[in-house]
Image: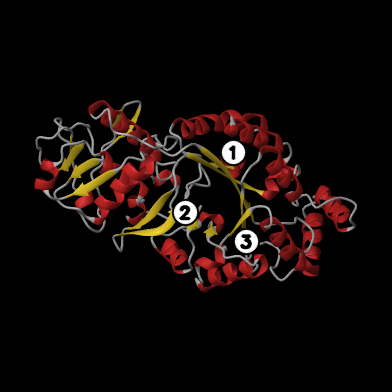
């Protein structure tokens, strides 16, 4: 048992210490604000206070965990143990920075509550993040800090036991457009032909014709391939289905189409399924409830997982709305433009609502790798993808984190811009499982 003394047990303190000690290190610990009780404890104990004090281990505290609300923070990043750190503290501290305040700042997404310039889709962009500006977006710094703390605790208290989580790999798939040509109705089909002819995209016209005449399989229908991949590598994937109303950014098949309903039901029989809240649902929150209920009616199971379409995320509103709908797990936390760790962590953790100042029961599962990063932003060739992804995978393994990948069913179509992209994904799966 590790006894931890602090002058005041705030919700932020309780949340952060539970994350670091219980979830990341797996060490039995107890928080107390009773100095007398702490002094009487004869076992392993540390102190976390703003003023220095005599203790086997004293970690100097920044003010952040004792504050309420948000404000601009004076952050100066500096090198630390092969990575980066911030919130520097008194030199007598066992650590040169307040690990707990820095952890809370990143995992609470504190900076996303502050004023920022939204991108074209109303999102917080990677380029505005502290991690990007200070060049540690590709490092799970929170996990590294926790490992450094574990080493310090082990050296000071050799009998203290740790049970950190084990490394896991979880592939996830967003189903934005289940079929490229089929099941789209007469008007959309005619519109597709017209667009192909007007743009002189004869390859698309030929492929559309062959597919609709059942001379070839629809290129976006890659579910048999993914199912076989699941069997071959014993994967436990999660599929997120977009079932919102047709709109500029929501172009999937209608949920009223029987073929789409059969597909969702079929996939749910061998893999976990979640809702992919539509782009339009950000304007009408009631849509998410309807979309969730639609999938539940098809699968005959409660839907407790979600990931926002286009990764549209506004804090804390988006997450609080999901909580109200009994969503328990969200997989949105990541960037479309950069690989890495948006919250500085590669371990699932609970969402902390900075407006309400409370820990919620919504578990956040941050992803690190996404197909669009390599295709559209990095402009990688298929042969370059594995080498680009390896450093991220290695770091997740190094800290015993959970590697979540985000790919789309059309990424496996082996057609148009995705020609040759099955192989690098298979290489990533193999490397992730080594």
Element at label 1: helix
Question: Which colour style is shown?
Answer: secondary structure
User: Residue at left 60%, top 37%?
Assistant: 379
The quadrant in which the N terminus is found is top left
Q: Give the number of callouts.
A: 3
Instruction: Identify the mark nearer the N-term, 3 or 1.
Output: 3
Can residue 408 be spotted in the picture? yes
Q: In this figure, which residue is indicated by the disc labeled 1?
A: 374
Q: In this figure, which residue is indicated by the disc labeled 2?
A: 119
Q: Nearer the viewer, residue 78 or 426?
A: 426
Residue 150 is tagged as none
Say above or below: 411 vs 380.
Answer: below
Q: Are marks 2 and 3 in contact (CB under 8 Å)?
A: no
Q: Quadrant of residue 355?
A: bottom left
User: Residue at left 73%, top 50%?
Assistant: 223
The quadrant in which the C terminus is found is top right
Can residue 244 be spotted in the picture? no
Q: Quadrant of residue 343?
A: top left
Residue 333 in the image: x percent, y percent? 47, 50
Instruction: Identify the mark nearer the N-term, 1 or 2.
Output: 2
Q: In this figure, which residue is indicated by the disc labeled 3?
A: 242
Give me the C-alpha separation between circle 1 and circle 2: 20 Å
Front position among marks 3 and 1:
3
Element at label 2: loop
User: Residue at left 62%, top 47%?
Assistant: 237
Residue 340 in the image: x percent, y percent? 47, 39
Q: Nearer the viewer, residue 399 or 354?
A: 399
Element at label 3: loop
User: Residue at left 35%, top 38%?
Assistant: 25
Front position among marks 1 and 2:
1
Front position among marks 2 and 3:
3
């Amino acid at each position: 048992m590790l006894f931890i003394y602090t002058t005041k047990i705030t919700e932020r303190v309780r949340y952060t210490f539970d994350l670091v000690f219980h979830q990341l290190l797996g060490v039995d610990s107890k928080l107390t604000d009773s100095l007398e009780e702490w002094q009487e404890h004869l076992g392993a104990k540390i102190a976390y206070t703003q003023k220095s004090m005599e203790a086997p281990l004293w970690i100097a505290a920044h003010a952040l965990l004792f504050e309420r609300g948000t404000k601009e923070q004076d952050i100066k990043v500096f090198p630390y143990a092969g990575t980066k750190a911030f919130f520097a503290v008194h030199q007598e501290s066992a650590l040169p920075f307040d690990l707990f305040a820095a952890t809370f700042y990143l995992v609470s997404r504190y900076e996303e509550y502050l004023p920022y310039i939204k991108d074209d889709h109303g999102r917080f962009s990677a380029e505005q993040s502290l991690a990007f500006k200070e060049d540690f977006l590709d490092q799970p710094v929170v996990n590294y800090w926790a490992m450094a703390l574990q080493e310090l605790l082990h050296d000071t208290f050799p009998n203290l036991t740790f049970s950190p989580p084990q490394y896991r790999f979880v592939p996830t798939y967003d189903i934005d457009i289940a079929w490229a040509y089929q099941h789209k109705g007469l008007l959309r089909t005619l519109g597709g032909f017209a667009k192909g002819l007007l743009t002189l995209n004869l390859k698309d016209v030929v492929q559309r014709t062959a597919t609709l005449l059942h001379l070839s399989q629809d290129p976006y229908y890659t579910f048999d391939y993914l199912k076989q991949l699941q069997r071959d590598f014993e994967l436990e994937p999660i599929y997120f289905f977009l079932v919102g109303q047709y709109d500029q950014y929501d172009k999937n098949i209608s949920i009223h189409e029987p073929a789409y309903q059969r597909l969702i039901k079929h996939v749910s029989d061998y893999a976990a399924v979640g809702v992919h809240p539509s782009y339009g649902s950000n304007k009408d929150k009631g849509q998410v409830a309807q979309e969730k209920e639609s999938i539940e009616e098809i699968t005959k199971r409660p839907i407790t997982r979600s990931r926002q379409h286009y990764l549209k995320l506004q804090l804390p509103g988006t997450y609080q709305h999901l909580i109200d709908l009994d969503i328990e797990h969200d997989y949105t936390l990541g960037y479309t433009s950069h690989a890495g760790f948006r919250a500085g962590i590669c371990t699932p953790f609970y969402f902390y609502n900075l407006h309400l100042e409370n820990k919620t029961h919504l578990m956040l599962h941050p992803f690190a790798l996404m197909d669009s990063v390599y295709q559209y932003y990095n402009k990688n060739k298929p042969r370059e993808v594995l080498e680009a992804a390896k450093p991220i995978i290695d770091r997740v393994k190094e800290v015993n984190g959970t590697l979540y990948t985000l790919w789309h069913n059309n990424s496996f179509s082996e057609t148009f811009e995705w020609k040759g992209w099955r192989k690098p994904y298979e290489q990533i799966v193999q490397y992730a499982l080594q």
